[in-house]
Amino acid sequence: MGGWKPVKLDAGIYENVSEIALKGQLAALENAYVNEAGAHTRFPGLSLFQTIPGGGRVFLTEWRGDLVAGTTGGMLSRLNQSGGITDVTGFPIAGGGRIVFDRTPDELVMAAGAEIVRLGSEKTDRLSAEAPPSTHVAYVDGYTLAIEPGSGRFWYSDPGLPRVWNDLSVFTADTQPDPLTAMLVTTQREIVLAGTNSVEIWSTYPSGAQPFIRRRSVADGLFAPYTLVSDKDGVWGVAGGESKPIEFMRFAGGGGKTESRPVQNLLDGIDDWTDAYAVIVNMLGQSWIVLQMPKATNLYGTEGVSLLYDRVTRRWASLYGWDDQRKLPARWPGWSYASVWKRHFVGGENGKIYELKPTTFANDGMTQRMMGRTEHLRYPAGGTIDRVRIELRRGETDPNSPEPTMSLRCNKDNRGFGRAVRKGLGLYGQREFYLDFGNMGHARSFQFEYEITDACPVEITRLLVHEA
């Protein structure tokens, strides 16, 4: 023994085994992510951007240089860069479900469980009296598409005429006899049709004999319809149910590839999948998927489980908001996401729209707790750690603000965490990049947990222990 030893930080959380079984993984990482250098960086906070009159849950998209916000109350608004609101509601968005948006060359189309709605130049209108009521609408190669809820059929408009729908313009997704629950069009112009027992990939077919053709299918059904997301790298969603485990999968080729192994035990324990959704967030050079089960009971006994998945490194972390009355982590406030003007926005409850900002370290003024917990460091014959050092970004707070702090506590021999040691993160300009936390004593195993609740930038580069 003797000398400094780094504690592994450059891993995601792993919740499929007990914490004492971890070898190199993190037991917890909340409101933070592991960056390319293996350091822990605080996840951006939420600053209130605007509140839509009439309230309701807010779903966002970008259209023609504006931020567009639809609500569960049926309203649609356009917002400019300064937050100015223009109500463009003519025909309300009915159905009460999550609003699904897509764009044609001339209009924005949307569905939430009832009539499909369009936005052209001025106000929303019903797309077509002949179009089926739907939960999902999409556009590809001149066709506007809609699934027929409760059936295996999807409908399509005449090419180039999104308002013209014919009784015979319908196809059946027929790999499995299951109802369609979700649909999207990928950046490769493939049509993804998801049911409870299978996922099919279709495309337009230029032969003239028929407009669409099924290219392939995946023998895994979509369990949570609004978790289906895609970008240029693939298609993901929560699959399973009935006799299959509920997993977060990447759908590819003839089968799904499980991406949720490190958090599978957590997914197995979700007690309520109501309103579960996923969104892709690309910012700060990172590529994430936020997966939220908003009604599920989390580890703290409050409502809301939110997971952050790094699509490049395949690492997982957790996101939380804060219950100020109970002083406990709670549901992360987001319900949707959109990027416009090189800025990033999140739709919330009660008409609220937030901006996701790396210079904000709270969630709409509420505590954003950053927390990390390591594996157990083992010394079978017993060992002494006489110093713990954390190297991190410091001294970059507001010059008029009090000094923020962080705490570190230790779990020795798995007997539970002891008293936290609190240290200052530096006043403005105090940028020495390490903090020493003193002697942790003698034990056969040591586990560390850090916590920052003050609003300040945090990037933890290394956690070092000095072995006596």
Image (cartoon, rainbow, N blue to C red):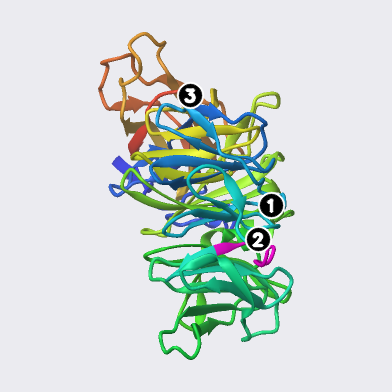
Q: Are marks 1 and 2 in contact (CB under 8 Å)?
A: yes
Q: Is residue 338 visible?
A: yes
**Dot 2 amino acid type:** Thr
Q: Residue at x 34, y 32 (%)?
A: 389
Say which quarter of the image contains residue 59: top right
| Label 3 Cα neighbours within 10 Å, binned few <14 / some 14-19 / many ≥20 | few
The quarter of the rendered structure image containing the C terminus is top left
For the record, the magenta segment spans 129-137
Q: Which mark is residue 135?
A: 2
Going from N to C along the chain, the mark reached first, 3 or 2, is 2
Going from N to C along the chain, the mark reached first, 1 or 2, is 1
| Label 1 Cα neighbours within 10 Å, binned few <14 / some 14-19 / many ≥20 | some
**Residue placed under numbered mark 3 in the picture:** 421
* x and y, in percent, of residue 133 in the image: 69, 63
Say which quarter of the image contains residue 358: top left
Q: Residue at x 38, y 42 (%)?
A: 65
| Label 2 Cα neighbours within 10 Å, binned few <14 / some 14-19 / many ≥20 | many
Q: Residue at x 70, y 24 (%)?
A: 325
Residue 206 lies left or right of residue 181; in this view the side is left
As measured in the structure, the alpha-carbon distance from the residue carrying label 3 to the one carrying label 1 is 47 Å
Kindly state the secondary structure of the residue where label 3 is placed: strand
